[in-house]
Amino acid sequence: MSGTGFLDGWKEEDTSDVAPPPVKKKKTNVWGEEIKPLPEGHDKMSLEELDKQSVAPPPVKKKPAPTVLAQGFISKEPPVKATSQKDLEEKKINKEFLMNAIPAVKPAITSTFTPPSIADAEDNLTGYGKHLTAVEKARQAQAFMKEQKNHHVFCGIVAPPKAGKSSIVFDSLTDEEAASGAEVWDIDFDGHAHASIMKNYPHRKDNILAINPYVIYKEDGRVPYDFPKTHLNIINILQDALRQVDTQEEYFNQHGKMPERWLKTVMLDGADSFLKICELNMKIADLDLGADAIAVSGKKATTSVGRTNWYIRSNYFMAALDLMKELSRRGVHCYVITHFKADYDSNGNEIKGEGVPHWLPRKTESALTQIIYMTLDEEIDDTGRRTGVVTSTAILKSNGVSLKSSGTVTIYRQDTEGGEWFGWHGLRDGSFSTE
């Protein structure tokens, strides 16, 4: 290859001791950013001039603000920018849909109270408004009771058959109250209330409601009634009464008078029958003894009824009494009516006398405020024959809100001439007076 001129003049040299040229590195700070050199004459510049000549950092991209919907829900998607009339219309439709689907939260009012409008009363069934405190509700209730001029009545009436126990409650409705739309609700277990109203109180047929609490058992069986559904129906009736009171109190607060229809009295007519329903309900629903409360094949035939499970019956019974207690607290006159239960000696012989009330022993008396006992006295002549004269009398045996005794009150006198009805006028305002 020599002589071609391509490598002519090349001479091999030893470069092992020659160092490579240095690599020029950029100066950076602790964050890895390049440090720019200061401008010439920086030592004579002011801070403002240095700030103007410094290189501004690149703008930081901010995430779009989340879209806040009704009720505080946050959308993760960025808000859609309306660029056309179509987008604007869709945005308006979506907003209206959300506002209708999720109702807005009303601000709570904790101090000064303004009575709500009648329109607000439709969804406000707390009595005096959901914006009231418990103390304010108590003041409203006290003013309402004072205006009504009624006494607290939660009365039990114990009487033999045909003593006029239901009639004295019907008669407690005055002409003025009936004209203003007052009502008496009679939860009738005996089935005679409607006939008695039509016969003896035809002028009150629009004011006295006889309510049948029984629910018919529609399947084949040995029982006519569905007892669990009957008990639930009774509870629903009493809850309806509380809702009625809520409505009429709200109306009174708005207008200073009662509405066209208002509830004055609720009567549980037949506490002994209701107690039996509670007992059957316990056996059917809780002890699984069949629809007629009798153990049959496939059921828990070994289940016994004793003191360990009678409390279940008591719970069913007291559920109704507690609702009636609340009604009486709200100004409604409440009556629990029952017959006398025969008392027996150790040999099983019936003890002559008035007997004991046929309701839940002890617990009923402790729940009631007043208790009335009624008796029937039959007149007998010297020969021992009945003359046909029968007198019904009543006496207030206890009154938890007054020490005044009523003495014996004559309710009616029955004789061959037709007799005379007297009633008990002290029940009209709840004073139990005998004047």
Image: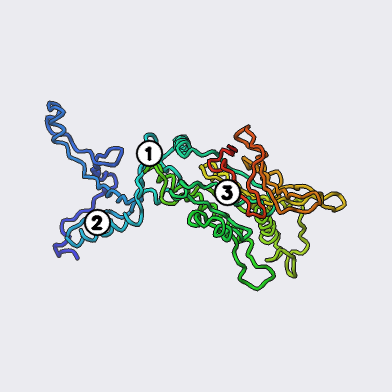
Which of pointers 3 and 1 lies earlier in the amino acid sequence? 1
Tell me, yes or no, whether the two marked residues, 3 and 2, touch with CB atoms within 8 Å. Answer: no
Tag 1: residue type? Answer: Ile
Residue picked out by circle 3:
169
Which of pointers 3 and 2 lies earlier in the amino acid sequence? 2
The answer to whether 368 is drawn above or below residue 307 in the figure is above
**Image-quadrant location for residue 328:** top right
Tag 2: residue type? Answer: Val
Q: Is residue 233 visible?
A: no
Q: CA distance from mark 3 to mark 1?
A: 42 Å
Q: Residue at x 30, y 40 (%)?
A: 31
Helix, strand or loop for disc 1: loop
Residue lying at the far right of the rendered structure: 347
- From the top left corner, tell me how far across and down residue 295 is, in percent: 74, 65
Q: Residue at x 19, y 66 (%)?
A: 1
- From the top left corner, tell me how far across and down residue 330 is, in percent: 51, 42
- Closer mark to the observer between disc 3 and disc 1: 3
- From the top left corner, tell me how far across and down residue 9 is, in percent: 16, 56
Q: Nearer the viewer, residue 148 or 39?
A: 148
The answer to whether 102 is drawn above or below residue 53 in the figure is below
Q: CA distance from mark 2 to mark 1?
A: 36 Å
Residue picked out by circle 2:
80
Helix, strand or loop for disc 2: loop
- Closer mark to the observer between disc 2 and disc 1: 1
Q: Nearer the viewer, residue 389 or 288?
A: 389
Crowd band around label 1 with a 10 angstrom C-alpha radius: few (<14), some (14–19), many (20+): few
Q: CA distance from mark 3 to mark 2?
A: 70 Å
Residue 119 located left or right of residue 285: left
Helix, strand or loop for disc 3: helix
Q: Residue at x 67, y 71 (%)?
A: 221
- From the top left corner, tell me how far across and down residue 99 is, in percent: 31, 54
Residue 4 located left or right of residue 217: left
